[in-house]
Image (tube, helix red, strand yellow):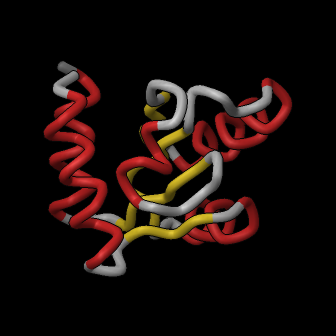
């Protein structure tokens, strides 16, 4: 995973309003079928990670775990999760996470 490229893409995604933050918002995006990729910060608690991964498994959403602190550095928003709406941003991130 090219961390610098992913960081830039996350910032663009946030500015384009294609990202949702916060537990409620992310879970709502996942369950509604609008989420293409869920990014989790490396410092997320095990209980929260299980909750997100369970919801993503049901909805067949790709989950990526980032290095600690990358989510906030890339987006300027504190939090442990970022749901990326389906579309080109999600597709590009999914490819980056797989490599």
The answer to which image quadrant residue 46 occupies is top right
Q: Residue furthest right?
A: 47
Q: Position of residue 44 (x, y in %)?
A: 70, 33
Quadrant (top left, top right, bottom left, bottom right) of the N terminus: top left
Residue, x 75% and y 67% (percent of image)?
24
Q: Position of residue 67 (x, y in %)?
A: 46, 25
Residue, x 40% and y 59% (percent of image)?
75
Residue 31 vs residue 7: left or right? right
Q: How many marks?
A: 0
Residue 7 vs residue 56: left or right? left
Query: In the displayed structure, would residue 62 be above or below residue 68?
Result: below
Query: In the displayed structure, would residue 42 be above or below residue 22?
Result: above
Q: Position of residue 8 (x, y in %)?
A: 19, 51
Residue, x 30% and y 55% (percent of image)?
10
Q: Residue 77 versus residue 22: which sits nearer the camera?
A: 77
Q: Residue 11 versus residue 25: which sits nearer the camera?
A: 11
Residue, x 68% and y 42% (percent of image)?
52
The answer to which image quadrant residue 29 occupies is bottom right
Quadrant (top left, top right, bottom left, bottom right) of the C terminus: top left
Q: Position of residue 64 (x, y in %)?
A: 44, 32
Q: Residue 74 versus residue 37: which sits nearer the camera?
A: 74
Query: In the displayed structure, would residue 25 be above or below residue 53?
Result: below
């Amino acid at each position: 995973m090219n961390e610098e490229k992913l960081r830039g893409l996350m910032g663009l995604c946030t500015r384009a309003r294609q990202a949702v933050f916060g537990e409620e918002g992310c879970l709502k995006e996942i369950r509604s079928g609008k989420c293409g990729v869920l990014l989790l910060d490396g410092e997320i608690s095990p209980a929260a990670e299980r909750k997100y991964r369970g919801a993503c498994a049901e909805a067949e959403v790709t989950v990526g775990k980032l290095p600690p602190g990358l989510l906030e550095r890339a987006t300027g928003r504190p939090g442990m999760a970022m749901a990326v709406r389906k579309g080109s941003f999600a597709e590009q991130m999914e490819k980056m996470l797989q490599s």
